Amino acid sequence: MDLKKEAAIKAISFIKGKSKIGLGAGSTIAHIVNFLAMDMVAGQELSLFTSSFTTHQLLLEKGFSVRHTGDIAELDIYFDGCDQVDKDLNAVKSGGGIHTREKLLASMAQLFILVGDQAKYTSRFDVKYPLVIEVLPEALFFVPYQVHKLFPGARVSQRMSDRTDGAVITFNGNYLLDVWFTEWPEPGPINQSVKLITGVVETSLFYNLAQKAIIAYNEGVIVHEKPIG
Ligand code: 5RP
């Protein structure tokens, strides 16, 4: 059984009629696109937005048109995958390096739903996932200097490209810093303190943003809700 496909099937059931839908990145989201494409009549009723180049290409390939995020202020639902999500529905989205666009769509959404398989759900974030910080090029040395003051035990490295000679440059023309913890600190304070450093554009920690996480387990799909309070 493909658990990500099961999560995608459940995700589709949240889409009701004409609506503005945002889609993130990854293999679970690709399943959602494939399911939408199975009913193009209903699919064409949707206004679709995406944070991901790859998802954008897939949507075009399937015959959908994709609208520009800069043209809207609100979305009905934003679906996205993650590296990990905790029981409070805070998520780490570090792999893709596109978290700034992802967080913008997530913030615009009336309903932000994370989707994935059981491997994503955790009680505490794993240190194999870094906190990724998108920084202005001019802040390349200033931000790590400030991060070391906040988290003396953490290691900071610039994300380099494995396909071209040089650094990864984001869609926004910025650099990415990977912050490697020996143990993940509490998410709330990190979110506040790192965001306050001048030169930080956005971090890959999605704190207090998702309302639901659709997680497919071997035993069935569970829609985890954000705890109240
Ligand atoms: C990258 C992400 C992606 O959404 C996530 O990695 C997708 O995972 P999957 O392919 O398992 O759906 O957050 O930062």
Image: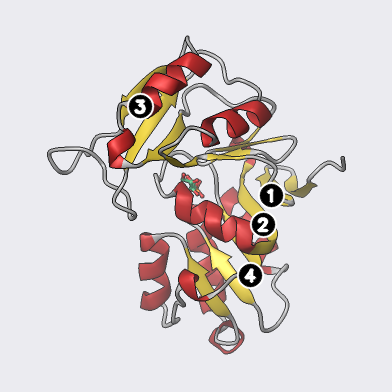
Sequence-first disc among 3 and 1: 3
> Marks 2 and 1, Cα distance to the nearest angstrom?
5 Å
Q: Residue furthest front?
A: 198
> Marks 2 and 3, Cα distance to the nearest angstrom?
33 Å
Residue 143 percent across, percent down from the top left: 39, 28
Here the colouring is secondary structure
Residue 228 percent across, percent down from the top left: 87, 43
Residue 95 percent across, percent down from the top left: 42, 40
Give the foreground label among 2 and 4.
4
Specify whether tag 4 is near ligand 1 (CB below 8 Å): no
Q: Which residue is mark 4?
A: 74
Q: Residue at x 35, y 69 (%)?
A: 57
Sequence-first disc among 2 and 3: 2
Sequence-first disc among 4 and 3: 4
Q: Which residue is mark 1?
A: 210
Q: Residue at x 28, y 40 (%)?
A: 137
Residue 91 percent across, percent down from the top left: 61, 39
Q: Which residue is mark 3?
A: 142
Asked if the residue under mark 1 is in contact with the one under mark 2, i.e. CB atoms within 8 Å, the reply is yes
Instruction: Please tell me how many numbered marks the rendered image carries.
Output: 4
Give the foreground label among 3 and 1.
3
> Marks 4 and 3, Cα distance to the nearest angstrom?
34 Å
> Marks 4 and 1, Cα distance to the nearest angstrom?
15 Å
Sequence-first disc among 4 and 1: 4
Between 175 and 2, the one lying in front of the other is 175
Q: Which mark is residue 83?
A: none
